[in-house]
């Protein structure tokens, strides 16, 4: 793995202005996050199930949707707990989610609108339950960090898979992308 | 001491001009950068270099996967001619372009000779 997931996490935090206050606020609502996670999963998979392509991916193997639903619930709750205060474990887990996406064929075109659904549904719950508006902002930030992280992992994992299969060096791979892009 | 690129270019130029039906040659790094090239006009050196490195590396992988042992060369045969890729030690890939009229036995001998010269400079 060419990319250091922990370093990327730190960079994403800086870029998204994800502060210590955001972390404290999310952690103080960790129980709430855990409580609504199954409902969020319900909404999320209901949304994905209505997309023909996504539905085909989710139901391709027996038990896949159940496993993914469990992963979603954990993932959602972890955005509030931060696992190890949004450290290496948190980053590695987001990396792993990106890897799973590559393995099962979930592209960024599927992930980005799906993440928007999470943000939208979470926002509805925040309003309905009169949670502080700052929480909405903190949750949006971590959702976007996770999105960026998962998508970057997607790119890195895809590249690493090509390098592994072809024996190409990373520099050669980038050169091919660059010469190919120039001719488009 | 650094690699003498002028000498590399001279070897390639001589190889291309003195070998019958050879149309071009290039020596590139495994990262796809040209060390020296003498290619026909209109060919994009940067692109050819990247593709040459990519093809040799992929060929070696395929050879391993198909249990063909160490790969001596990758041979591309088209209706306009041949492309031959040979590893030139660990640090370079040698590409030779030849027309359909080339005598293949002679071409292989000439490539072997050129490789010897190129390797002596690269080491």
Image (tube, rainbow, N blue to C red):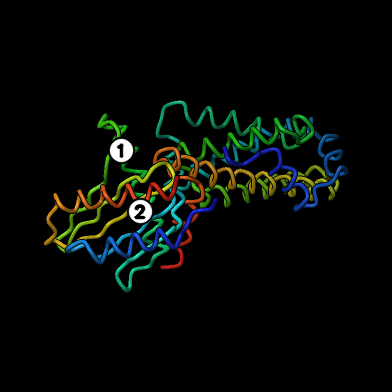
Q: Nearer the viewer, residue A5 or B60?
A: B60
Who's the residue at 56% across and 39% down the image?
A: A98
Left or right of residue A81, residue A50 in this image: left
- Which mark is nearer the camera, 2 or 1? 2
Residue located farthest toward the bottom when viewing the structure as drawn: B41
Q: Earlier in the sequence, mark 2 or mark 1?
A: 2
Image: B71 above or below B9: above
* CB contact under 8 Å: marks 2 and 1: no
Where residue A125 appears, as percent x and y from the top left, is 74, 44
Q: Nearer the viewer, residue A172 or A52?
A: A172
Determine crowd level at label 1: few under 14, some 14-19, many 20+ residues with C-alpha closer than 10 A: some
Left or right of residue B54, residue B81 in this image: left
Left or right of residue B29, residue A157 in this image: right
Where residue B122 appears, as percent x and y from the top left, is 44, 48
User: Where, quadrant-wise, is the C terminus of chain A in this rendering?
Assistant: bottom left
According to the image, label 2 marks what residue? B52
| Chain to which mark 2 belongs | B
Q: CA distance from mark 2 to mark 1?
A: 15 Å
User: Where, quadrant-wise, is the N terminus of chain A in this rendering?
Assistant: top right
Disc number placed over residue A167 in the picture, else none: none
| Chain to which mark 1 belongs | B
Where residue B83 appears, as percent x and y from the top left, is 24, 56
Q: Secondary structure at mark 1?
A: helix
Quadrant in the rendering for residue B65: top left
Q: Secondary structure at mark 2?
A: helix
According to the image, label 1 marks what residue? B62
């Amino acid at each position: 793995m060419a990319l250091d997931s922990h370093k990327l996490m730190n960079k994403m935090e800086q870029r998204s202005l994800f502060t210590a206050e955001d972390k404290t606020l999310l952690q103080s609502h960790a129980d709430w996050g855990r409580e609504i996670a199954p409902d969020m999963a319900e909404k999320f998979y209901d949304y994905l199930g209505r997309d023909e392509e996504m539905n085909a991916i989710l139901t391709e193997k027996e038990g896949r949707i159940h496993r993914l639903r469990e992963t979603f619930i954990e993932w959602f709750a972890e955005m509030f707990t931060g696992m190890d205060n949004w450290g290496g474990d948190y980053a590695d887990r987001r990396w792993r989610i990106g890897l799973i996406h590559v393995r099962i064929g979930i592209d960024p075109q599927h992930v980005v609108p799906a993440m928007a659904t999470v943000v939208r549904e979470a926002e509805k719950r925040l309003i309905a339950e009169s949670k502080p508006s700052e929480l909405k902002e903190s949750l949006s930030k971590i959702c976007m960090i996770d999105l960026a992280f998962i998508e970057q992992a997607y790119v890195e994992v895809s590249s690493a898979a090509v390098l592994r299969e072809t024996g190409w060096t990373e520099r050669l791979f980038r050169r091919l992308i660059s010469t190919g892009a120039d001719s488009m | 001491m650094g690699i003498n690129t002028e000498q590399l270019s001279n070897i390639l130029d001589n190889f291309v001009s003195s070998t019958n039906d050879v149309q071009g040659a290039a020596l590139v790094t495994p990262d796809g950068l040209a060390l020296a090239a003498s290619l026909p006009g209109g060919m994009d050196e940067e692109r050819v270099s990247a593709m040459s490195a990519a093809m040799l590396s992929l060929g070696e992988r395929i050879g391993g996967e198909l249990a063909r042992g160490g790969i001596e060369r990758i041979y591309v045969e088209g209706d306009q001619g041949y492309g031959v890729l040979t590893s030139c030690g660990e640090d370079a890939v040698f590409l030779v372009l030849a027309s359909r009229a080339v005598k293949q036995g002679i071409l292989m001998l000439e490539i072997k000779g050129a490789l010897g010269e190129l390797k002596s400079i690269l080491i």
